[in-house]
Amino acid sequence: MKKLLIATNNKGKVEEIQNLLKDLDVELVTPDDIGLKLDIVEDGKTYAENAGKKAVAFAHASRLISLADDSGLEVDALGGAPGLYSARYLPKPKATDADRRVYLLQNLQNKPRPWTAHFHATIAIAAPDKPVQFAQGQCNGEIIHEERGTGGFGYDPIFFFPELGRTMAELNMDEKNRLSHRAQAIINAKPILKEIFS
């Protein structure tokens, strides 16, 4: 069976992407599955640069078609921050997701509400010796001042969908995989993947 490498070491992302691609007629493998350890410096100026860099590095190292993503939370009251730096937002070593959520809320304290925001995701698909192809997705909501829900990861417990009355962390996997930025990006990436694997 043809293989697609999910080019991330983030277990939350792996679980989401595996779920989103379960109907694709390929074997989904992770870096752990094939004993591949790569630590890519995400120093690009755009989501596409970072996602592309990861996808290409994993494709070259594994000789497998590789799918990587770069995503971020953009908060309007903070001028689009943390954005590209969402996973590295708090300038201290070994900061956790919870630490970053606290730091974000501290930075929002004196800003007028609602704290409108969106999640953005760019997917990059790299095949060895072929140009990288991209797909994007976005979902809109707002940041709330208290954490709700135990699902997901990152900023999910404070990212609220007003129309649902729930946070991203209060959605089950099926709901998240209909609404999330990564879900939208994967939906847009599926025609590319089907063409590559056909």
Image (cartoon, helix red, strand yellow):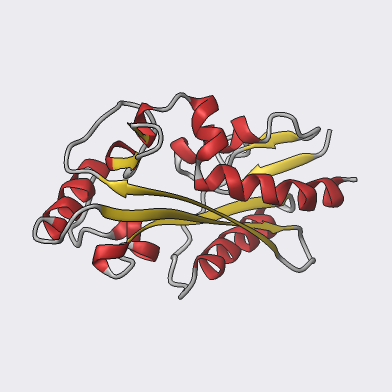
Q: Residue 196's x, y, as percent?
A: 84, 52
Q: Residue 116's x, y, as percent?
A: 31, 55
Count every numbered label the image shows and give the total. 0
Task: Tell me, yes or no, if residue 87 can be seen here.
Answer: no
Q: Residue furthest left?
A: 110
**Residue pictured at 40% horizontal, 64% vertical:** 84
**Residue pictured at 63% horizontal, 39% vertical:** 34
The quarter of the picture where the C terminus appears is top right
In this orientation, which residue lies closer to the viewer: 105 or 63? Answer: 105
**Residue pictured at 57% horizontal, 35% vertical:** 178
**Residue pictured at 40% horizontal, 54% vertical:** 118
Left or right of 183: which side holds 95? left
In this orientation, which residue lies closer to the viewer: 111 or 169? Answer: 111
In this orientation, which residue lies closer to the viewer: 144 or 12? Answer: 144
Q: Residue 32's x, y, as percent?
A: 55, 37
In which quarter of the view is residue 177 placed?
Answer: top right
Left or right of 141: which side holds 120? right
